[in-house]
């Protein structure tokens, strides 16, 4: 059975910039202990049939809101389950929902409005201001884009973290969560495993400290991504 992160039978990927798959909209629920959201999804976007189990786990077991946070970023926002939950939990902050897939971006905007969340900025990656300083990154990152593209994506956005910031990632174990954690450490990040549940790991990643003397490398001794 195809899972939510595999290509559709049409050969399209959820990370295509402009999906051509015929639209078939539906509504899914995101039920968390502190909030409930109703979200519109469509074919051609990631996990259209239900909120992805990894994204839900991240929202259930990730850290609570930090009072002083002003800017949050969701890398690969999809139709917005993580972005909308963050916006609801952090009304004082602006949530940047960054996404390559324009159908997903449109859904994310629609879901923000439908859930009365006016603190979400939905953007294509290159439309995010260069100098944006981010307090907290939350992401179910697009592992399926391939290791090189994933590494480039993470280096780009982790570079926006404030010195006191952190990133919270959910990654499937069988898609290389542990080798990704090792690679991040090789780049100079401190990585803590917050939780390991069923198929997923939750990783807490700190920004590279200016005093850290690391030798970044793209070498990775495993082949499990
Ligand atoms: C694993 S999905 C998670 C989607 C959403 N956060 C969720 O929980 O349903 C990863 C998302 O990253 C998007 N993506 C792929 N490459 C990207 C890139 N370079 N920049 C931003 N988003 C990207 C994909 O289109 C996809 O929507």
Image: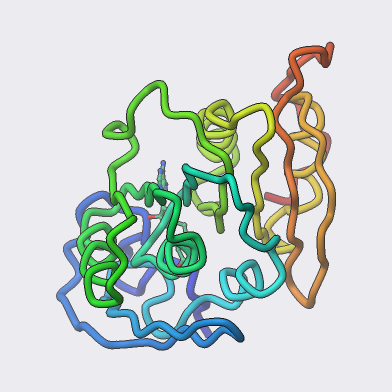
Image: 124 above or below 161: below
Q: On the picture, is 102 further left or further right than 159?
A: left
* Ligand 1 visible in quadrant: bottom left
Q: On the picture, is 13 further left or further right than 86?
A: left
Q: On the picture, is 207 further left or further right than 193?
A: left
Task: Residue 177 in the image: state x and y as whole percent.
Answer: 74, 54
Which is more toward the observer, 82 or 150? 82
Colour pattern:
rainbow
Task: Residue 225 in the image: state x and y as whole percent.
Answer: 67, 49
Image: 122 above or below 109: above
Task: Tally the marks.
Answer: 0
Image: 212 above or below 125: above
Task: Residue 110 in the image: state x and y as whole percent.
Answer: 21, 69
Task: Residue 31 in the image: state x and y as whole percent.
Answer: 52, 87
Image: 61 above or below 35: above
The residue at the point 61 percent across, 52 percent down is 67
Residue 62 quadrant: bottom right
Residue 164 quadrant: top right
Residue 182 quadrant: top right
Which is more toward the observer, 183 or 169? 169
The residue at the point 48 percent across, 79 percent down is 51
Which is more toward the observer, 117 or 219? 117
The residue at the point 67 percent across, 63 percent down is 64
Which is more toward the observer, 210 or 169? 210
The residue at the point 74 percent across, 17 percent down is 216
């Amino acid at each position: 059975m195809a899972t939510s992160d595999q290509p559709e039978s049409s050969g399209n990927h959820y990370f295509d910039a402009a999906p051509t798959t015929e639209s078939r909209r539906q509504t899914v629920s995101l039920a968390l202990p502190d909030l409930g959201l109703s979200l519109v999804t469509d074919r051609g976007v990631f996990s259209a049939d239900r909120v992805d189990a990894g994204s839900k786990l991240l929202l259930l077991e990730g850290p609570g809101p930090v009072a002083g946070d002003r800017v949050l970023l969701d890398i690969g926002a999809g139709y917005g389950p993580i972005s909308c939950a963050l916006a609801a939990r952090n009304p004082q902050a602006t949530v940047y929902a960054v996404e390559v897939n324009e159908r997903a971006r449109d859904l994310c905007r629609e879901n923000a409005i439908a859930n009365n969340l006016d603190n979400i900025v939905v953007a294509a990656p290159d439309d995010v201001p260069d100098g944006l300083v981010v307090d907290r990154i939350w992401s179910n990152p697009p592992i399926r884009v391939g290791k090189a593209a994933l590494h480039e994506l993470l280096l780009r956005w982790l570079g926006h973290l404030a010195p006191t910031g952190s990133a919270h990632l959910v990654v499937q174990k069988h898609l290389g969560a542990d080798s990704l954690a090792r690679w991040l450490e090789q780049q100079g990040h401190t990585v803590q495993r917050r939780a390991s549940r069923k198929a997923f790991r939750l990783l807490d990643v700190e920004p590279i400290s200016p005093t850290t003397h690391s030798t970044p490398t793209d070498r990775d001794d495993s082949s499990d991504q």
